[in-house]
Image: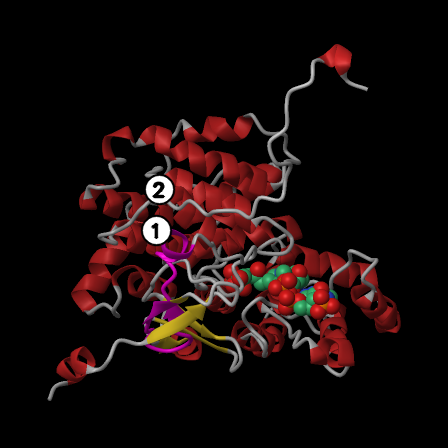
Amino acid sequence: MTAEKKAAAAPAKTFTLKDDQSGKEWKLPVVDGTVGPNGIDVRKLLAETGHITFDPSFNSTGACKSKITFIDGDAGKLMHRGYSIEDLTQKSNFIEVMYLLLYGDLPNKPDYEEFKRHITYHTMVHEQVHFFFRGFRRDAHPMAIMCGVVGGLSAFYHDSLDINNPQHREISIHRLIAKIPTLAAMTFKYAIGQPFMYPRNDLSFVENFLYMCFAVPAEPYKINPVVAKALEKIFILHADHEQNASTSTVRLAGSTGANPFACIASGITSLWGPAHGGANQEVLEMLHEIGHKDRIPEFLARAKDKNDPFKLMGFGHRIYKNYDPRAAVLKADCHAVLEELGVKNEPLLDLAMELEKIALSDPYFVERKLFPNVDFYSGIILKAMGFPTSMFTVLFALARTVGWCAQWKEMIEEPDMRIGRPRQLYIGAAGRPYVALDKRK
Ligand code: SDX
């Protein structure tokens, strides 16, 4: 008997839910994942029991089915479409990983070349976009500009925003993936008062981004292959990460039928938070504030003090209860990249490693399984490449755009996709009569 016939013949898996007051019982179907936790299907819970589930930060709630990314938080493992993040960072490149995330398999040579050509030939932005920037002060945070400009891009493509049209979805995704680096580089140039550099089609995706950031019209620019390779790895490491806050924001926005530019702009706004993608900037600022390893105990004490809002930035994760595999890759790369860049001794790296060593031997962090996450080491490398801390989350958004697009695409292509609409546990006032102003105390 084939596996499918066996599965069909096997008794349906269920969970029994019992109301201890009434003694009534309900059988809830179980939905199986390939790996990781299975799900209890509660879609009929309210209709059948008059109760909702209550899980405010979605700690135990699956919002969708997905084939794109899987995280084993206890083992500290991450894979995209079944390929480990270690394999992808060591053997693949960002264009190929983008194809994998979007279309489900590694491309053959012709498909790879065609996808690369599509992305290359969509990197330029409409010349009118330059005027968006003029409205911002030069000291505007680059993420503030990205929130505005990416959402505004939809104004240029009214002819291809029908999300139910596969061709419109495809070209919108290509435009977003290709133009985000151009816009990110423009936010950097605008902040430092240098002229925008137009994209070059003879360069790779990552080389082109470095060119648009660091070249000037006055002289030729030489790509540093070490920087390009390290940045390629950083982009791969940040590409997608299951249903994190910003991806969930993109999915919820997309479920209303909003156009993909507006949805990705919503992801950028959500990623900006210091508890999320904004942490890479906060880690560098925290390391600068700590300043010397002698002050580490003071900051660890603050991180443990429930009356102090300070958190050890770059530590902890909702899913990883082990070392974030992305942080492990970046930590290993840190030394190599800094050395290749001629940064003999980076005090911030020494401080970060000392902080990690002390924190990982502290019972508070050990008991709570708080390990370094992707943001802990990324900023040190980005700083060595010449990016200001204000650009760190922009680079995270640049890399995550393909993940957001892949998740958005997967959701829109779900046959039974519906608008997302969570319920609530109402704890406010029950009905009460209106009292006229002159009768109130
Ligand atoms: C990203 O979701 C994703 O996948 C996100 C991301 C992605 O790729 O999309 O991985 C990217 O956002 C990485 C996280 C970057 N953020 C930071 O580094 C900011 C610092 N970290 C914390 O804010 C926190 O760890 C979170 C936000 C990441 C997770 O918050 P949770 O889920 O509330 O943490 P938890 O439930 O594991 O906390 C358990 C305990 C709590 O204390 P108790 O109530 O048990 O006493 O650990 C404490 C927390 O207060 N804690 C920390 C801490 N992180 C958790 N205490 C001090 N410093 C910290 N960093």
Q: Which mark is residue 260?
A: 2
Residue 37 inside the magenta-drawn segment: yes
Residue extending furthest toward the bottom: 1
Q: Which mark is residue 408?
A: 1
Where is residue 170? Give x, y as percent: 24, 48
Label 1 close to label 2 by CB (< 8 Å) = yes
Residue displayed at 75% across by 83% down:
361
Q: Secondary structure at mark 1?
A: helix
Could you say which quadrant of the image residue 300 lies in? bottom right
At label 2, which amino acid type do we have?
Answer: Pro
Residue extending furthest toward the left: 1
Where is residue 62? Give x, y as percent: 42, 62
The answer to which of marks 1 and 2 sits earlier in the sequence is: 2
Residues drawn in magenta: 26-49
Can I make out residue 215 in this image?
A: no
Q: Secondary structure at mark 2?
A: helix
Can I make out residue 156 in this image?
A: yes
Q: Nearer the viewer, residue 74 or 440?
A: 440
